[in-house]
Amino acid sequence: MKKLIFIFIFFSLNIALVSCQDANATIQLQEDPRVEKIDDIDAKVNDLLSKMTLEEKIGQMNQYNGFWDLTGPVPSNGDAAKKYDHLKKGLVGSMLNVRGVKDVKAVQKIAVEETRLGIPLIIGFDVVHGYKTVSPIPLAEAASWDLEAIKLSAQVAAEEAAAAGINWTFAPMVDISRDARWGRIMEGAGEDPYLGSRIAVARVEGFQGDDLSAANTIAACAKHFAGYGFSEAGRDYNTVDVGTSTLNNIIFPPFKASVEAGARTFMNSFNELNGLPATGNAYLQRDVLKKQWDFDGFVVSDWGSINEMIAHRQAKNRNQAAELAVLAGSDMDMESYAYVNELVNLVKSGKVKESLIDDAVKRILKVKFELGLFDDPYKYCNEETEKQVTGSRRINDAVLDMAKKSIVLLKNDNNVLPLKKKGQKIAVIGALANDKTSPLGSWRIGADDNTAVSLLEGLKAYTGNTITYAKGADVVTGETLFPKELTINATDKSGFPKAIATAKNADVVVMVLGEHGLHTGEGRSRTDLNLTGVQQELLEEVYKANKNIVLVLNNGRPLTINWADEHVPAIVEAWHLGTQSGNAIAQVLYGDYNPSGKLPMTFPKNVGQVPIYYNHKSTGRPNLPSPGEVFWSHYTDVSNEPLYPFGYGLSYTTFAYTNLKVEKIADHQVKVSFDLKNTGKVKGKEVAQLYLRDEFASITRPVRELKGFELVELNPNETKNITLMLTDKELGFYDNDGKFVVEPGDFTVFVGGDSTASLTSQFTLK
Ligand code: NOJ
């Protein structure tokens, strides 16, 4: 209640402020000595820093949530009134979760016009897959393997967010993960460091554009540094314990690629790594990120992660947590209230050198200068632009295009798909078919509920067939208010009879099953990967009535769908595809778009196989020695093979790979070429993939690793010769001293349409 009253007073005050003060703050800034014509940003930063008190410097390192408490627990040790007071005193450098021109302007105005130095705030928000218009969840986008489309998706997300006053996104999430139980798997690019790195670059470039100071670009944030995707047992926030080689060769590459692509900020992570919480981990933040990789942006803590160092039992109290975090290189404190309360004394007592504070503040100010906030702190605050850009045609076109490209065709026996456009009776079954919220997925806090096109709506746009709908069973019951936990085990089967009757009467049944958008994401890990609630039973009952089923999956992670794979003729992986979901899926089902997506994660047969990933090590006992033997690396009850391998996905056409040639052009330059032919009857796209095995090395290497790919569109009977190059970057690896080495020896190349590709050739590096 107190908070509500505060919000009211806060905004009433600001409405008054906005109306009685000159809105053109640049006039005030021009009179400010710190904006005298100094060309170089570093010089400007140094000049400003020299005018700041210790308290003001530490204020820049303090980030507050915008009083709405959307994406984390409400801190018990601070209240909104205190935040407001700090804002006025210049003790806040950034706010998150303030959005919309009106609100951003209101807080920015306080920072710029009421504080002594008028330093603008940097406004952060989780623009993870779109702001108000939502694109597919990042895992789905990764399934497109279409770097241009992914870049455009980030670009339009930046455009819409920037128009709403936001200038910094907490994305891309570049955590590699091999564990589908982990709820945040939906937020990254999957299990592979090569694909993950290429996508990280596309996303950073998309958000930041060529000119960070433009009013339609925003600063990116590579997160969560590092290891968060390896939480034990897939349980969110759990301990991480990985070896040096995995850290260097699997976890680090997308982060390093993000730095190289110019990501201006990093976020550290909730987990510990080798006994040190990432927030208090100097090896990660200082040695690797800032020194080895020469990162000159700033690191923000994750929400409350400085305080969580106490729960981790690294720090005894907030004072020590602040000390350890700043020493370790965490530059900005998100919602721990640790820096703002503890750092002044830590500096005065000599425990923390002021030079460390200066370094953090310089990094933060530099990004603010680069964003152009000092030239015009309201550059992201134009009501007209906000109106024009939000939900624009261009943005909707881009997210529709992205959604179509993200769909993966998993099975299509007897060419059940594409659906005929006329004269068919189609039964549509499943609560998710008629859901306009779930397709938005998790991490879409800027979008309103009920704003996605449902699949039922998408199908109805095609008018040649008769469509009958039956829900069958709920996927969630009760409370659906974010961020409450959603029920996962809806049990009501009273809708079954109607669903069965509807199916009996139909030529084809489209069943939309899986998990709700909010069954995934932060804090939403699962120990089983089945269709939730009674959906599996519903599927089996409907199958008894009509076997001609197209199963459309809506999910944020690999699911275990063995029964469906054995029985159902067609399966379409449609993830959570965002605002245009229903239109995208309908266009694929009707063949107006030929699916081209490929899985960015291995799909397990059962949860006991997890973590299961294609680029595993060989082990000392990889093969069954002779029939019936037991002493080899396997399970007694299920094979080692996944249900669907990494890189897998079908099309309405077929492709053939031939003519593989491997040629050494120079010392460490290998040219791989092959022919790809469309052997089917329709035009289609294929992601041609190249995998490499380093046969023997000083440390064991994976059985194969993705090292190149090309997305190719071909007409029926058309053949294209594809060339992919292998250079040091692809041929080498990090040894256990963290040194990148390219070792002489034998290599095997594999090319094909997924990670089981069997066309091979060898070469030797001298
Ligand atoms: C916690 C999440 O881990 C992080 O990814 C997110 O950016 C922050 N909350 C802010 O919402």
Image (cartoon, rainbow, N blue to C red):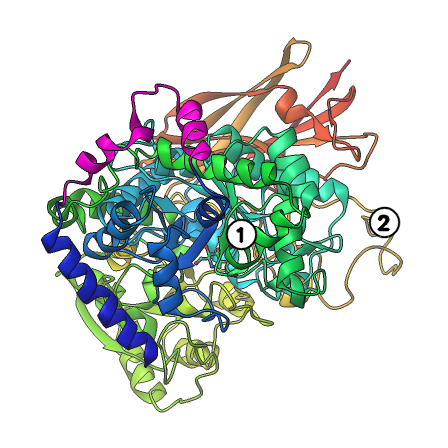
- Please determine whether, in this image, residue 457 is positioned above or below residue 158: below
- Disc 1 element: loop
**Which marked residue is nearer to the observer: mark 1 or mark 2?**
1
- Disc 2 element: loop
Task: Assign the N terminus to one quadrant of the image.
Answer: bottom left
Q: Position of residue 154 (x, y in %)?
A: 34, 42
Q: Circle 2: is it few (<14), some (14-19), or many (20+) Cα within 10 Å?
A: few
Q: Position of residue 455 (x, y in %)?
A: 26, 64
Q: Which mark is residue 621?
A: 2
Q: Circle 1: is it few (<14), some (14-19), or many (20+) Cα within 10 Å?
A: many
Q: Specify the farthest residue to the top.
A: 666
Residue 737 can be seen, yes or no: yes
Our reading of the magenta stretch's main secondary structure is helix
* Distance from Cα at disc 1 to Cα at disc 2: 42 Å
Residue 24 falls inside the magenta stretch: yes
For this rendering, which residue is in front, 201 or 574? 201
Q: Residue at x 53, y 71 (%)?
A: 530
Q: Residue at x 57, y 60 (%)?
A: 180
Q: Which amino acid, mark 1?
A: Ser
Q: Specify the farthest residue to the bottom.
A: 494
Q: Which residues are magenta?
A: 23-51
Discs 1, 2 touching: Cβ within 8 Å: no
Q: Residue at x 77, y 32 (%)?
A: 735
Q: Which mark is residue 301?
A: 1
Write down the quadrant of residue 655 in the picture: top left
Write down the quadrant of residue 413 in the picture: bottom left
Specify whether 289 is left or right of 336. Answer: right
Q: Which amino acid, mark 2?
A: Arg
Q: Position of residue 320 (x, y in %)?
A: 67, 58
